[in-house]
Each structure stands twice: as structure tokens, then as C-alpha cells.
Amino acid sequence: MFVRIRKMVAKEFIQVFRDSRMKAIIFLTPIIQLLLFGYAVTTDVTNVKTAFLDLDRTVETRELARRIESSGYFDISRTPGSPGEIRGLLDGGEVLVAVQVNRGFSRDLKSGSTAGVQVIVDGTDSNTATVAMDYLTRIIGSYAAELEGAIPAVDLRTRAWYNPDLRSRNYNIPGVIAIIIMLTSLLLTSMAVVREREIGTMEQLMVTPLKPVELILGKTLPFAAIGFFDMFLVTALALFWFGVPIKGSLVLLSVATAVYLISVLGVGLFISTISRTQQQALMATFLFFLPAVLLSGFMFPIENMPLAVQYGTYLNPLRYFLVIIRGIFLKGVGPGVLWPQMACMLALGVFVLAVSSMRFSKRLE
């Protein structure tokens, strides 16, 4: 049995590496995806195009403008001459934020009166708008307190327990790694099996002494090994290129990846049983892949989804692996904390792989 499986695994590796398209999917696509998403997927707000309308024109208002721009969050690219110009700048998308300092700002602050500052934000991108307003509120409030000579009643000192630099890249890249592993494994498993059927070699395999379970193992084990290789490849790129720290154990990450691959390869095997051509397999893969990403918590918090959708996410292996990989990378937590996600992912993976294997065996018989 083991000899036949070994021969089948060797045959799969030869077939995969003989195909230039497959080699690109294995080696090149994960690197390109991580580089692309690593730079593009970020929620950090920096260099926001800002208009600053100074109707007071005093030393204090010029200092306020300097502090806003030197914060690194805002780029004062426009200085309109009147309030009417602000609307045109926002409508044309030339700025995302406009700050209007009213006349008498300095006088009102020094006299203890309420000073008028208006902040207008383009709310098209609600995340950027919310973060920008929060930054401006802090900058303006801090400067106003200095001018008033106010002494804070509370000495508030904040500390980020995990990801102390608050870099969104440290949070997003581990999620991108999980997505890359899923996409690569799904594509390889689903399309490779269908390719055997397309070129007519599946019938040849069926008349060999290979049993269905041996054929299934021979088909999935090579792609599991490739999945592990891609995981280490993109993890090394995340560590040494993007500087994302990993606080936890690589051994635990490897074990979690193995459990994750059980469910992903099972889904790929199931897709192969319902597809007649590689085009159908490709479409079915993305039909599963896109909802899996959207309902995993990678982009949107699961807690904000409708209750029925939240229950549906429990059938998504990516949901559990995201918690695990981010916990290992950012928090350094161990199996004592992650075992519920590991157990759920294992149960789901065994079920999916078992159903897919039985369906695949029936197709072979």
C-alpha cells in the first residue's frame, strides 16, 4: 500500500512541476499576492489630503496648522481663501478633510471663551473619515489646552498590549498568509483531479491496483506538502521583507496549518467531484473562495454581521485559522488558548474530507 501511494505521490509531483502554469501558481503567485496585499491592504491613515482655512490669521493658528501637518497624518495641500471654496475641494475629491479656524480663535482661547474650529470630512470612506476626525480632535484639543494653560486632572497613559506600534500591516499580513494557503491549495486540488479526467488518464488510474483511498491520498498528499511549502515561503517573506514579528511558536503554526489543510483539501476534492472541466473547477473554486474570505472576519468583524450569517461562519475553516495565525503572530499564545479553534477546525476538516472522499470514491467505482 505504502509503495503504491509513494509511486502515486511521485507521479503527482512530476506532473505538477512539468506544467509551467502549475509552477507559477506554486512559487510565483503566493509571492506576488503577499507583496501586493502587504502594501495595499492597510487601514493606516497617513498623508490625508487636507484643506486649512485660516480666518483668524494669527501666530496661534499658524502653529495649529504646523502641528496638524507635522503629525504625519495630514498633508495640508490646499489653503482656500473662503468657506465657499471648501465645498468645491471636497466635491472634486481634491481633499478628504477641511479645517476651518474661525475669526477670534486666539482671542477666545486666551479669554477662556469657546473658540470655533470646524472640521469637515468626506464621509465616503467611513473608516478614514472616523480615524481622521479622531486624530484632528486630539491634535486641536491638545493645542487648545496648552494655550489655555489647562492642567489635566488625570494623567492618562495608554499602552497597546499587542502590536504596540499599531501597524495595520502586522494584523493584515497573517490573514493574507491564510488566504494565500487556501487559494493555492484549492486551485491545485480541484483542477489537478479534473485535469486527469479531461486528458483521459483517470480511466487508466482506475484500472490500476490502486484502491480509492490510495488514489485519494496520492492526490492530496502532494498538495498538502506544497501548501506547507507556500506557508513557510510567505511566512519568511512576511518576517524578513515586511518585518512582521512572530511572537509564538512555529511548531504550533505548522500543526495548525496541517489541520487547516485537511479542510481546504477536502473542499478542493469535493469541487473536483462536481466539475467536469478545469473551467468549471476554477469557477467553483472562486464561488467558494470569495464568500469564505468575506465571511471569515478578515475584512469585516463577524460580530457586526446578521445573526444568521454569524452562524454560517462556523462552517468556514478560514474563520478559525485567522484567529489562530493572528494569535501566534501578534500575541504569542499557545495551544492552551487556541485549542477551541483547533478543535473546531479539526472537526470541520475531518467531516469535509470524509464527505469529499466518499463522493470521490463513488465516482471512481
Image (cartoon, rainbow, N blue to C red):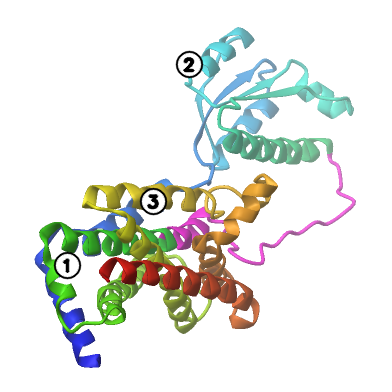
Q: Amino acid at mark 1?
A: Met
Q: Earlier in the sequence, mark 1 or mark 2?
A: 2
Contact? badges 1 and 2 (CB < 8 Å): no
Where residue 331 appears, as percent x and y from the top left, is: 59, 71
Position of 310 relative to 99 (above/below): below
Q: Which corner quadrant holds the N terminus?
A: bottom left
Residue 239 is at least partly visible in this image: no
Position of 228 relative to 277 (above/below): below
The residue identified by callout 2 is 92
Q: Residue at x 58, y 47 (%)?
A: 300
Where residue 133 appears, as percent x and y from the top left, is: 66, 34
Q: CA distance from mark 3 to mark 2?
A: 28 Å
Q: Amino acid at mark 2?
A: Gly
Q: Residue at x 61, y 78 (%)?
A: 339
Q: Amino acid at mark 3?
A: Phe
Contact? badges 1 and 3 (CB < 8 Å): no
Q: Nearer the viewer, residue 164 or 170?
A: 170
Q: Earlier in the sequence, mark 1 or mark 3?
A: 3
- Label 3 or label 2, whichever lies nearer to me, is 3
Where residue 206 appears, as percent x and y from the top left, is: 18, 74
The residue identified by callout 1 is 202
The residue identified by callout 3 is 37
- Splitting the image into 4 quarters, where does residue 18 fall? bottom left
Q: Secondary structure at mark 3?
A: helix
Q: Residues within 10 Å of mark 1 (few under 14, many from 20)?
A: some
Q: CA distance from mark 1 to mark 2?
A: 59 Å
- Splitting the image into 4 quarters, where does residue 145 fall? top right
Magenta stretch: give its range. Answer: 149-176
Q: Residue at x 32, y 46 (%)?
A: 283
Q: Residues within 10 Å of mark 2 (few under 14, many from 20)?
A: few
- Label 1 or label 2, whichever lies nearer to me, is 1
